[in-house]
Image: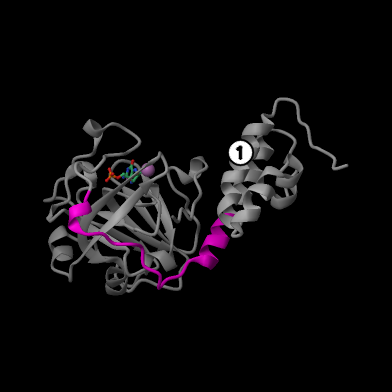
């Protein structure tokens, strides 16, 4: 008989629910998936993560180590040439839902006049950018689906600069691991370089043909149809290229960092 780990004060069922969520995308074989996940025990979590499960802190450590493993697997599986689906204009969701870690009335107001996009880290050209300069670059458009982990998805139309064009323009070290974002509302996130260079990753300046509205991320957001909603930062103020992992607002509270959909 397998020895079961039992720790007083730990909610085994909810730990295993979290662990199953982390592992599910990793098990390709659908017919075996539910069988394998149902069989998961705390001992299994300890084994997969290489962590002892003795208290709440060690559960956190184990789950986050599994989540980082999940990031690596998603990174390996990510196909830079696979495109996310696009849709006809007739399928755009109206009105497009708003979401943030606060209510719509608290969305930040950014003044275009004084706004400068900061660029730092592993880039050749660290000068800051005015919106006009970004509008003068080649523009692209996409009608894609945004998927939020809170249980909704919506199709929207975004326009702006292909992010790989921008990274080239600033002389970014594209061998670096991460691109990070700081936002006007204290939100922050970071992404893998492969996704940053994906053809559909866009520094969006418009929504549905008009200047990006305040609540949807003015002055700009990063739109990635290959990643879940929380990975798409709105109100971007600073972009940095780095080899140091820097997490994100929700990622630091347990959301998976890679966040692919
Ligand atoms: N700056 C900032 N960006 C953010 C968020 C936020 O709270 N602040 N929320 C994220 C989440 S969870 C979602 S689902 C989308 C929502 O974008 P929308 O308001 O355009 O639908 O923004 C993402 N980017
Ligand atoms: Mo979200």
Q: Residue beneath label 1, please? A: 17
On the rendered structure, is 59 left or right of 207? right
Pick whichever, 117 or 217, lies toward us: 217
The answer to whether the residue bearing label 1 lies less than 8 angstroms from the nearest atom of ligand 2 is no
Q: Quadrant of ligand 2?
A: top left
Which portion, as a residue range, is magenta? 69-92
Q: Position of residue 7 (x, y in %)?
A: 76, 30
Q: Position of residue 236 (x, y in %)?
A: 28, 51
The reply to whether the magenta stretch includes residue 3 is no
Q: Is residue 141 above or below residue 8?
A: below
Question: What residue is shown at x 14% (from left), y 46% (from top)?
Answer: 111
Pick whichever, 9 or 94, lies toward us: 94
Question: What residue is shown at x 23% (from left), y 43% (from top)?
Answer: 96
Question: What residue is shown at x 71% (from left), y 51% (from top)?
Answer: 48
On the rendered structure, is 204 left or right of 197? left
Judging from the image, what secondary structure is the residue with disc 1 in? Answer: helix
On the rendered structure, is 106 left or right of 82? left
Q: Is residue 113 above or below residue 129?
A: above
Quarter of the picture containing the C terminus is bottom left
Q: Position of residue 58 (x, y in %)?
A: 68, 39
Q: Position of residue 1 (x, y in %)?
A: 88, 42
Determine the residue located farthest toward the top in the rendered image: 9
**Label 1 Cα neighbours within 10 Å, binned few <14 / some 14-19 / many ≥20:** some
């Amino acid at each position: 008989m397998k020895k079961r780990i039992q720790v007083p004060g730990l909610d085994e069922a909810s730990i295993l629910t979290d662990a199953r969520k982390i592992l599910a995308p990793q098990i390709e074989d659908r017919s075996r998936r539910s069988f394998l996940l149902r069989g998961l025990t705390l001992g299994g979590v300890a084994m997969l993560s290489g962590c002892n499960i003795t208290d709440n802190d060690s559960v956190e450590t184990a789950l986050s180590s599994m989540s980082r493993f999940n990031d690596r697997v998603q990174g390996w599986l990510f196909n830079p040439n696979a495109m996310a689906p696009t849709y006809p204009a007739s399928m755009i969701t109206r009105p497009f839902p708003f979401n943030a870690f606060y209510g719509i009335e608290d969305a930040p107001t950014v003044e275009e006049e004084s706004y400068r996009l900061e660029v730092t880290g592993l880039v050749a050209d660290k000068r800051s950018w005015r919106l006009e300069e970004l509008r003068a670059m080649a523009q692209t458009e996409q009608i894609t689906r945004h998927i939020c982990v809170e249980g909704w998805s919506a199709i929207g139309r975004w326009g702006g600069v292909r992010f790989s064009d921008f990274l080239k323009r600033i002389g970014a070290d594209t061998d670096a691991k991460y691109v990070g974002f700081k936002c006007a509302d204290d939100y922050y996130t970071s992404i893998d370089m492969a996704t940053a260079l994906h053809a559909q990753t866009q520094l969006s300046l418009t929504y549905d043909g008009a200047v990006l509205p305040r609540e949807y991320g003015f002055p700009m957001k990063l739109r990635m149809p290959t990643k879940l909603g929380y990975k798409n930062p709105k109100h971007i103020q600073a972009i940095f290229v780095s080899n140091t992992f820097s997490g994100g607002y929700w990622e630091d509270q347990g959301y998976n960092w890679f966040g692919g959909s």
